[in-house]
Amino acid sequence: MKSAERRTAPVRGAPCWVSLLARDLEAAQEFYAAVLGWTFRPAGLGEEFVVALADGEPVAGIGALAPSFQVAVAWTSYFRVDDADDTAARIRERGATVAVGPIKIGTGRAALAADRDGATFGFWEGQTLAWSVGHGRAPVCLELRTRDAFAAAIFYAEVFGWASEEPGACDVTYEHDQVIVRDGSRPVAALRGGGVEAAPDPRVRPRWHVHFPVGDVDAVTAAAEAAGGTVTPEDPPTGAGGRQAVICDPDGGLFTVSGP
């Protein structure tokens, strides 16, 4: 992939970042360095936030979860918006929840929300990093597993302007029992059914799954177990890529690794 192509900014409504809020920032950095080979640099947002790098390029963010913030540790997908206040209003109007924000962070504004089935996501107003799903070592895919993929697609389309006639919007198609979201010609997210709202297992409750690309699934899962994580193989795979495994880091953060 050419460098210029990797640096194309996400369009409005497209995924623009993924981040993890961890209870122990130093321990999280040690785990993801051992498992995914990431290095880290300051994020410019204070000592409690870092940007993860792979091959010198930004991949994800990790921040320290405030002790008073009683939420589960989880990877969160963020979507680019033009107006955070307008987006928050659209979410509330459709019976969903804005849990935090919009608040000013650095040069932009961000918020955390949950859709009507409880899947958590974020949105960002402002300048974005040179990052895009499917490019380099950034996530190969973002996948929403939810109760009703069509109902979820309508909700997110109304919130983020997917499938609208306005220029610069994401396209939406139905393929192979999934709703596919495209930034131009590139698929950047998939919505599929099967999530169970009351399930005790967080892997099957409605949530956004982050798929990181790896060269060797076996080596990565062995490293995860050695570093204190747990692994659940997925066969056959449900998202993008070849072989897959769901990894739970020692803090409880779930993510998926996908082979070539």
Image: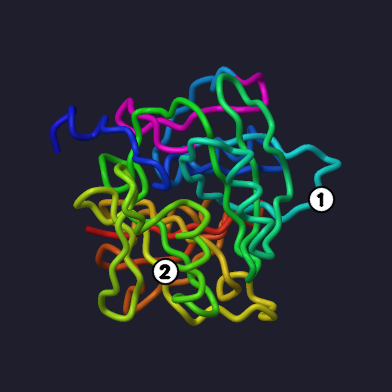
Q: Is 170 covered by the magenta stretch? A: no
Magenta span: 45-60
**Residue 73 rendering spot, x and y as whole percentages:** 67, 52
Asked if the residues shown at circle 2 and circle 1 are in contact, with their CB atoms under 8 angstroms apart, the answer is: no
In the rendered structure, find residue 153 and report the number of the disc placed on it: none
Q: Which residue is at a point 47% across and 68% down the rendered structure image?
A: 154
Q: Nearer the viewer, residue 10 or 84?
A: 84
Q: Amino acid at mark 1?
A: Gln
Please state, as top left, top right, bottom left or bottom right, where the N terminus lies in the image.
top left
Q: Is residue 181 above or below residue 175?
A: above
Q: Secondary structure at mark 2?
A: strand
Q: Residue furthest front?
A: 165
- Residue that numbered label 1 is attached to: 70
**Residue 198 rendering spot, x and y as whole percentages:** 69, 80
- Residue that numbered label 2 is attached to: 191
Q: Is 52 covered by the magenta stretch? A: yes
